[in-house]
Image: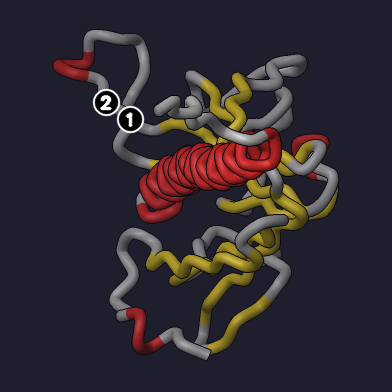
Amino acid sequence: MKHRNQGFTLIEVLVALAILASLTMAAYQVLNQVQRSNVVSKESEIRLGEIQKALAVMDSDFRQMASRQFRNQGEEPGAQLLWMQDGLLSSEGVGILFTRHGWVNPQMQFPRGDIMKVGYRLIEDRLERIWWRYPDTVAGDNGIGRPLLTQVESMSFRLYRNHQWVERWEDKGVLPEAISVKLTLKDYGQIERIYLVAGSELSLSNVSD
């Protein structure tokens, strides 16, 4: 008795190929989604690290403000210990300039003290920190710029003294008791930090809105 060889029909082969293609496409989509999630997660991690580093630098500067007059661009030192105004340091918004304690000078090896002059400005959606080797600078010394944070839409400051917040500072010979720094980021919205200035006897609960 003769037996016919059993094989696959064309329809069966096509159905099998269709199933295989569907499974392959599903597996690719899952893999692609995982890869995209990893990329987004990595970018988010890098961005958060950038923000944290910028805030750490600002924390160090604003918490250690020094009550010291200083020269800028060769001008005689004025009575103001803190400069804050639109366009200062070529900022596209408000800029700020002050001196701070805590610049490391071990055993006074360098011809300077432990006070440095620093400023902040906004250039092309980028927050920059400017610093000088000496508090009193000559004309043409524009300092050393360091980009701190990208995607910054705006920067604003409020200053606390005599039980109230103000947005302009014209007091002579004194520093504010606290300062509020508000950054508006394109991706994370508003971030506000409040710093008590060195020597202030306030607590954060005293300066809340």
**Looking at the picture, how far across and down is residue 172, in whole percent?**
61, 61
Residue at 76% across, 15% down: 140
Residue at 68% across, 61% down: 184
**Looking at the picture, how far across and down is residue 149, in whole percent?**
60, 40
| Circles 1 and 2 in contact, beta carbons < 8 Å | yes
**Looking at the picture, how far across and down is residue 18, in whole percent?**
65, 42
Image quadrant where residue 130 sits: top right
Image quadrant where residue 20 sits: top right
Label 2, residues with CA under 10 Å away: few <14, some 14-19, many ≥20: few
Q: What element carries label 1?
A: loop
Total marks shown come to 2
Relative height, residue 158 to residue 139 (above, below): below
Instruction: Identify residue for label 1.
Output: 103
Nearest the viewer among 142 and 138 is: 142
Residue 104 image label:
2
- The residue type indicated by label 2 comes to Val
